[in-house]
């Protein structure tokens, strides 16, 4: 199991890993792309992004041991495959209720599919609440 999972916290660590990330809109306003590798953690209802992925590995990550770059509330969020929005393969778009939009990408098909499925599960779970 991932470090931090089942630690008694109500915030369950669902998934963590490295993805290419760029923010493409903030509050509905389009932004210039700036792709970078990001350490992405799905914990509770949030997707949390960390810089400096080199110092992070799934086995040593613990909630609270580094400061997140940003965090996305998945409640009411929308997820779509978005290969038309990039020349890269395996791209999906995540849009928050506040109109922030992110593209997430991996060269590894199986990995990006797992992320898509897991995030979609959380969004659907929140939709039912
Ligand atoms: O959708 P775009 O504008 O073609 O995205 C590309 C640009 O952001 C480019 O940077 P410049 O702003 O210097 O042109 C990036 O280097 C590319 O990675 C972006 O496209 P991809 O297809 O990689 O998402």
Image (cartoon, grey):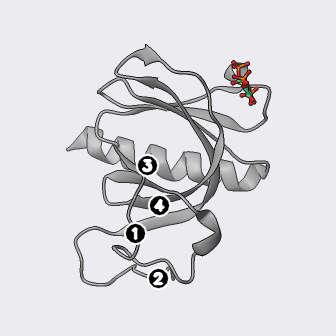
Check if mark 1's residue and mark 4's residue have beta carbons within 8 Å: yes
What SS does tag 3 mark? helix
- Mark 1 = which residue? 13
Q: Which residue is mark 4?
A: 41
Q: Residue at x 65, y 38 (%)?
A: 35
Front position among marks 1 and 4: 4
The residue to which callout 2 is attached is 3
Marked residue nearer the N-terminal end (1 or 2): 2
Q: CA distance from mark 1 to mark 4?
A: 7 Å
Residue pointed to by mark 3 = 121
- The CA distance from mark 3 to mark 4 is 15 Å
Name the residue nearer the viewer: 35 or 128: 35
| Badge nearest the viewer, 3 or 2 | 2
Q: Ligand 1 appears in which quadrant?
A: top right
Mark closer to the chain start, 3 or 4: 4
Residue at the (19%, 44%) spot, across then down: 129
Give whichever of discs 3 and 2 has the lower sequence position: 2
């Amino acid at each position: 199991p991932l470090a931090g999972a089942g630690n008694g916290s109500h915030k369950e660590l669902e998934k963590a890993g490295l993805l290419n990330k760029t923010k493409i809109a903030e509050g509905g306003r389009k932004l210039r792309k700036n792709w970078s590798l990001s350490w992405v953690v799905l914990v509770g209802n949030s997707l949390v992004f960390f810089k400096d992925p080199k110092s992070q590995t799934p086995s040593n990550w613990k909630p609270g041991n580094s400061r997140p770059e940003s965090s996305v509330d998945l409640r009411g969020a929308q997820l779509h495959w978005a290969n038309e929005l990039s020349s890269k393969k395996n791209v999906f778009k995540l849009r928050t209720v506040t109109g922030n939009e992110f593209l997430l990408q991996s060269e590894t098909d199986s990995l990006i599919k797992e992320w898509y499925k897991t995030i979609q599960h959380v969004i659907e779970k929140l939709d039912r609440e």
